[in-house]
Image: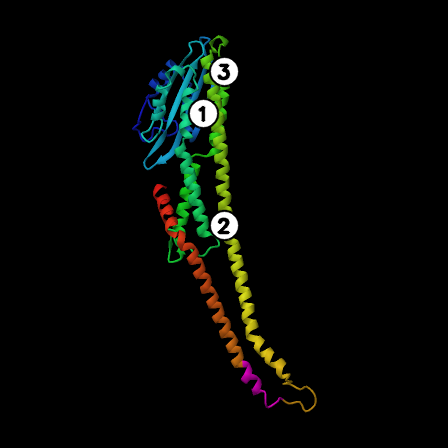
Amino acid sequence: IQKDAKDLETFTPLKIPLPPAHYEQMLKCLRLPLHAVELTTFLGPLFWYRYVLLEDDDPHLQMVFGKHDSRKKTGTRGWELILSYSFKRRETTGFVKWTPTADIVECLSNLRDCVLDISHPLLIPSIIMSDLVATSDEVKQREARTSIRQLEKAISVNDDTTGFYYSKDGTIDLRTVASDLTEHHRRILHRPPKLYSKVIDALEAATDCFWAHIDPTDKTKALDRLHATLKDRFHCHRVSFITAEIAQKDAKLNLKIAGDQRKIAHASKSDSQAMKALSLLGAAFLPGTFIASIFSMSFFDFQAQAHVSSKIWIYFAFMVPLTTAVLLGWLFWDHKRRRSQHLTRSSANNSGSDTEKAIMFEISKRA
């Protein structure tokens, strides 16, 4: 056991925790797979296994289970578990190391409480897998979905963004929005459901491999119950990750819908401006047309001795004031309508603005 590894490069690809000669000797003495050195290059969760017959006709089930994360500040982080189960001696040997930020310590503590069930080589990976799908991770995923929905509301058709911590004087800080989106994606991708589903597949395959090669005389009732329990647990984990994958796709779909809503809002705004321009043109020309139709005036006579009526000023005397009055009335009505809509939105959103602000502030702190 190598706990709280201090080397900042301990999980760098092809980096081993001991001098090469000592590390090779340890792997051979404990019958651990040499493939563990090659598997140091992986990033994220990985479970690898194989059934192999060693030199002394001793069949072994060798496994490598680990999670190497990307760099955190100045160093790497993660944990790694290398196991080898001897079917002949019915014992499991292994090597495990982790950095101080890993949560594997609690798993080893739980293992001490399951001493009577240690005969099954997949018990340790099962305990670790159960910790990976703990309730705390589900809560973090749900918090990320909640904050994404709050973000959707801010960038959707609703123009009123009061109550959101990245909104100031009705203007959205796009830099803060982009930062939040990046953080939410990081928190969701930190535990990608599809990748963990593949780990579950490998764990189930290793469990079946163990049960297929174990001596029938060693299949006691206690071991059979434990084997069935592990299979059921892996099935539950699979359901959990399938649910998480559906939730992740739902969150991505919601983001896409929010973007489409924003595009529709811009298109609607452009159409509204075009209709407003047409209304303005109609308001400008309608009074003159109305006056002309009432007076039925023929200003230009194209027949012989045509002339323009000397009383044409009567038309302009009525048309100009009436057009001005209509335009001013239209502008006043439009201003009053927009102010009424703004007050309606404000009264509808102010009731929940304090709660929304508190929720967004808490989510930003936890992120």
Residue identified by numbered label 3: 211
Q: Is residue 215 left or right of residue 113?
A: right
Amino acid at the residue labelled 1 = Phe
Q: Where does residue 54 sit, x and y in percent of width and height?
A: 45, 12
Q: Residue at x 52, y 64 (%)?
A: 273
Residue identified by numbered label 1: 47
Q: Which of the two discs, 2 and 1, labels the residue nearer the N terminus?
A: 1
Q: Secondary structure at mark 1?
A: strand
Q: Residue at x 49, y 34 (%)?
A: 243
Q: Residue furthest left?
A: 6
Q: Secondary structure at mark 3?
A: helix
Amino acid at the residue labelled 2 = Gly
Rendered image: mark on residue 259: 2
The answer to which quarter of the image holds residue 6 is top left
Q: Quadrant of the C terminus?
A: top left
Report how many numbered discs are placed on residues in the image. Answer: 3
Mark 2–mark 1 Cα distance, whole angstroms, equals 38 Å
Q: Is residue 20 left or right of residue 240?
A: left
Amino acid at the residue labelled 3 = Trp
